[in-house]
Image (spheres, rainbow, N blue to C red):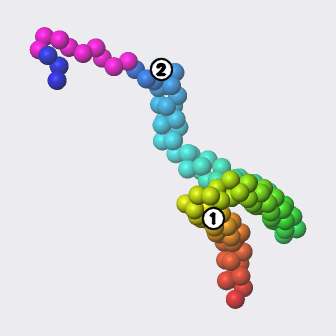
Amino acid sequence: MVPLGKERAPAPSTTSSAQHSRRRAGVIRQAQPEAPGHQLAASHAASEKRKANKMTPMERRAKRAADEKRRWHEKRKATRESAAKFSMASEDPEKVIASLLDELVAEVAEVRDEVDEGELQEELEKL
């Protein structure tokens, strides 16, 4: 509550006059009758660009192989790190259990990541 006789100074404006005029120009541009046509054309152009950049089945297989190789190396590195942790933590059962649970969670996450929803959808459509 503000004490009587004292008034707060107005809050400083966070938008400059240039920002305000750009925002107004955008609103005015959107109100123009040809705005929906421009938006539709931009949407079609973006769609065509996505189609042109779509991966071929060979590229998709190569990417999956590279991802699988990367995951294998990451898993190998994690296994080595966990072995080092295990050797240090072998005296404390709680630390051993915690490290084993961490490994299990990482494995489940890896399997979940390997499932490609797009592939499953394609298989479903084929069936």
39 is higher (above) or lower (below) than 21:
below
Instruction: Indicate which disc residue 16 carries.
Output: 2
Q: At x 17% / y 11%, what residue is drawn?
A: 6
Residue 44 position, x and y percent, is 68, 56
Crowd rating for badge 1 (residues with CA inside 10 Å; few <14, some 14–19, many 20+): some
Name the side, left or right, on which 26 lies relative to 115: left
Front position in the image: 108 or 97: 97
Q: Which of the 4 image quarters holds residue 12? A: top left
Q: Nearer the viewer, mark 1 or mark 2?
A: 1
Crowd rating for badge 2 (residues with CA inside 10 Å; few <14, some 14–19, many 20+): few
Q: At x 61% / y 47%, what residue is drawn?
A: 38
Q: At x 48% / y 35%, what residue is drawn?
A: 28
Look at the image and tell me whether residue 54 can be seen. no
Please, what is the dominant secondary structure of the magenta stretch?
A: loop
Q: Which residues are magenta?
A: 4-12
Q: CA distance from mark 1 to mark 2?
A: 56 Å
Q: At x 65% / y 59%, what residue is drawn?
A: 90
The residue labelled by disc 1 is 100
Secondary structure at badge 2 equals loop
16 is higher (above) or lower (below) than 48:
above
Please identify the residue farthest to the bottom as the structure is shown: 127
Residue 101 position, x and y percent, is 59, 65
Find out whether residue 17 is within the magenta segment.
no
